[in-house]
Amino acid sequence: MRIPIIAGNWKMNKTIKEGVELVNKIKDITNDTDVEVAVCVPYISLNEIKKTIGDSNLKLGAQNMHWEDNGAYTGEVSPPMLKEIGINYVIIGHSERRQYYNETDETVNKKIKSALKYGINPIVCVGETLEQRETGKAKEVVKKQIENAFDDISSDNMKKIVIAYEPIWAIGTGKTASSEEANDMISYVREIIKGKYGEEISEEVRLQYGGSVKPNNVTEIMNQTDIDGALVGGASLKAEDFIELVKF
Ligand code: PGA
């Protein structure tokens, strides 16, 4: 049985104070649900939010990291720094990082390996552009992203990874992939994992959908056979909305 996982991706939103306020409003939801709930917050808020979470079951994630342990990389944050805070997850390869910060399949692969080495579970994002979808290339693109991201990743490690399928054209646009479209791609991702790691692992790996998930579409999305969760941007910034998502 795969445990559903709803993760908020705050992106570049919320000051430390605002983040603490939001977490204080949402953290108790974890007492009344079997769903795993996480918030992925800006680096500077991680420490304070970790304290705010206290002994609630809310999980904490970062939105990126470098793959090296340390060094002359001005402005970057390393896996040991994140490990010391005690985070559970790190988003790797979000389309905004691929688009604006030259993240490639190769750096995604390095970051995944490095996160796993430090016991931080990666949430790995894949997804096609509108043009790629309209020209019938969506599956080819996602397959390549998956193959490159998981190059040289062991079966044991694969189980710890969450994959988020986020069609780029649905992120922050209010356009969602229809739940059937989302499920179709996510089932395909599970097939790829099955081809590489076998049935048992493919049935264990959790696959999220991301892209304009809101309280009014979450139930339909979560009812799909292969969708185990959601990675949520906009709707994770308001306590009431996020709580509704968790109660899908
Ligand atoms: P959105 O963002 O929910 O605002 O579309 C999702 C994401 O980018 O993870």
Image: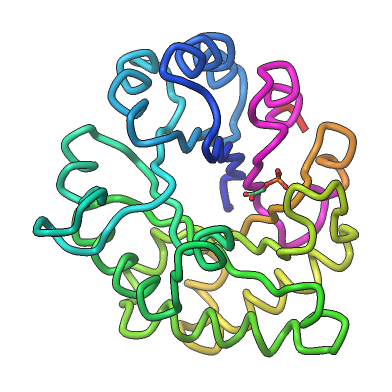
Q: Judge left or right: residue 223 versus residue 166.
A: right
Q: Position of residue 31 (x, y in %)?
A: 54, 16
Q: Residue at x 31, y 37 (%)?
A: 87
Q: Position of residue 217 (x, y in %)?
A: 87, 41
Write the start and end of the magenta stretch as one range.
221-246
**In the rendered image, which quarter contains the C terminus?**
top right
Look at the image and say whether residue 37 sits in the magenta stretch: no
Q: Nearer the viewer, residue 98 or 122?
A: 98
Q: Position of residue 66 (x, y in %)?
A: 27, 59
Q: Position of residue 56 (x, y in %)?
A: 42, 17
Q: Residue at x 60, y 34 (%)?
A: 35
Q: Residue at x 32, y 18 (%)?
A: 48
Q: Judge left or right: residue 147 versus residue 71.
A: right
Q: Judge left or right: residue 238 versus residue 222.
A: left
**Where is residue 33, by image quadrant?**
top right
Residue farthest toward the front in the current orientation of the protein: 74
Q: Judge left or right: residue 61 versus residue 199.
A: left
Look at the image and say whether residue 240 sits in the magenta stretch: yes
Relative to 122, say whether 244 is above or below. above
- Exactly how many numbered labels are in the figure? 0
Residue farthest toward the left in the current orientation of the protein: 71
